[in-house]
Image (cartoon, rainbow, N blue to C red):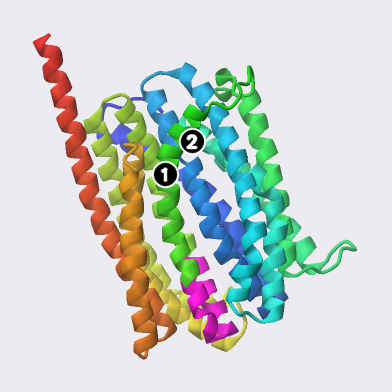
Amino acid sequence: MYETSSITEKIKLFVIIFVPIFVTQISLFLMNFFNTIMSGQAGAKDLAGVAIGTSLWVPIYTGMYGILLAVTPIIAQLTGAKKQKEITESMQQAIYVAIFLGIFVIILGALLLDPVLQVMNLQQDVERIAKYYLFALSLGIIPYFIFNTLRNFMDALGRTRMSMAIILLTLPVNIVLNYIFIFGKFGLPKMGGIGAGLATAMTYWINCIIAVVCVYALTPFRSYHIFKNWKKPIFKQWKEQLTVGLPIGSALFLETSIFSAVTILMSGYGTNTIAAHQAAMNFSSLLYMIPLSVGMALTIAVGYEVGANRLKDARTYTNIGISCSLLIAVFNSVILFVFKEPVASLYHTDTEVIELTSKFLILAIFYQLADSFGAPIQGVLRGYKDVRILFFIAIVSYWLIGLPIGWIFANYTALEAFGYWIGITIGLTCGAIALLWRQFYIQKQYAFKSSQLYESRNVR
């Protein structure tokens, strides 16, 4: 990151930050994308099993990643304030937090996975595939959390191309491992959807190893000496990260878990409906990577400017990011409407599944528009470290508005399963409106504090 003096320079820097983040998020998402598609080629039960496993894993991972994401605004603000010495200690403690969270998730999964799957009342083969897909994937959770912590550190310094390079390097490896384990190549047994979990875990390990080497050996990361003079856990610094990270993680968990809740509620509609719902959700989630990446780029840019007390520049980056996200969302909506059937056919060859998926994709157009407005604003608020409000907005808009409305539409109208998607769209729209109000409020608060500080200095 560096200081800019004109809108043109800001747009250029924002694009430099955003594009690698977007490519990285797309590549990370494509791991789940290829898991789903390649498992679907192994059979409908494998597709449904991986769909259920993914619907349980994604909200847990997203919530934990939200906690790790606190590294980005913390390091960005320290960088803007030119406090380099504090960055090393913060990163060492952040790695401790990542390991702790990984152990916590593994223990949680061991205790709760069987009861949750039994409540879902799935077909026996689908339940078995979902269970062992998650078990295989869990072998890579701790290294994946460490990788994401190091990635957030690199991104916060504005070096987003490094994490992009790592993911682009390992994505083909994941595809090859999927091919080997899912379909049983090179003398190995055919594992179906379970093999996708094992391939993903191995890829997580590779990501982590490469990231550690980069931070240790490459400029400018090695100048921070993250892996030298290692200190013991300092729980006061854990508290700082958790104070910022827990609200972020909780908000992301509540947002993503609503889709998992919908998947669970839709389990009574049959395997084809679950498969179609998951396929449409998988592709629309791919589109969500755009506003999510914009939000992550805004966290870096806004956090850097806020740390340097350049509040006007922070507002300019905010306007650039939100405008970019909305323009791309409109373009995506047109593409999605025109190519809904070819997209649906990527996931399955069954005519009924393709038809159902196409209908879900039409509904996805509307909720991704709301996402494209809300996700960048969340990134802005993270840049200001104003994160507690995110949890309350998420729980009200998604769980107290969106899900109940969806349940009513699904059970008391002819919409049935499609009613849940309408409810999600309404919830996301309410959340986006609330986030916009909070953005205006926090910008005014910072401007007021800055003016008071300026006046007090003049009096002296």
Based on the picture, tell me whether residue 4 belongs to the magenta stretch. no
Based on the picture, tell me whether residue 270 belongs to the magenta stretch. yes
Q: Residue at x 48, y 28 (%)?
A: 237
Most extreme residue toward the bottom is 414
Q: Which element is circle 2 on?
A: helix
Q: Residues within 10 Å of mark 1 (few under 14, many from 20)?
A: many
Q: Which region shows up in magenta?
A: 262-284
Could you tell which of marks 2 and 1 lies nearer the N-terminus?
A: 2
* Residue at numbered disc 2: 155
| In the displayed structure image, the side of residue 239 where residue 448 appears, left or right | left
Q: Is residue 317 above or below residue 458?
A: below
CB atoms of marks 2 and 1 within 8 Å: yes
Q: Marks 2/1: CA distance?
A: 9 Å
x and y percentages locating residue 38 in the rendered image:
68, 68
Q: Which element is circle 1 on?
A: helix
Q: Is residue 204 above or below residue 451?
A: below
Question: Given the image, on which type of amino acid does mark 1 rest?
Answer: Met
Q: Main secondary structure of the magenta part?
A: helix
Quadrant of res 102: top right
x and y percentages locating residue 93 in the rendered image:
55, 29
Quadrant of res 33: bottom right
* Residue at numbered disc 1: 296
x and y percentages locating residue 111 in the rendered image:
65, 59
Q: Residue at x 33, y 25 (%)?
A: 3
| In the displayed structure image, the side of residue 345 where residue 425 appears, left or right | left
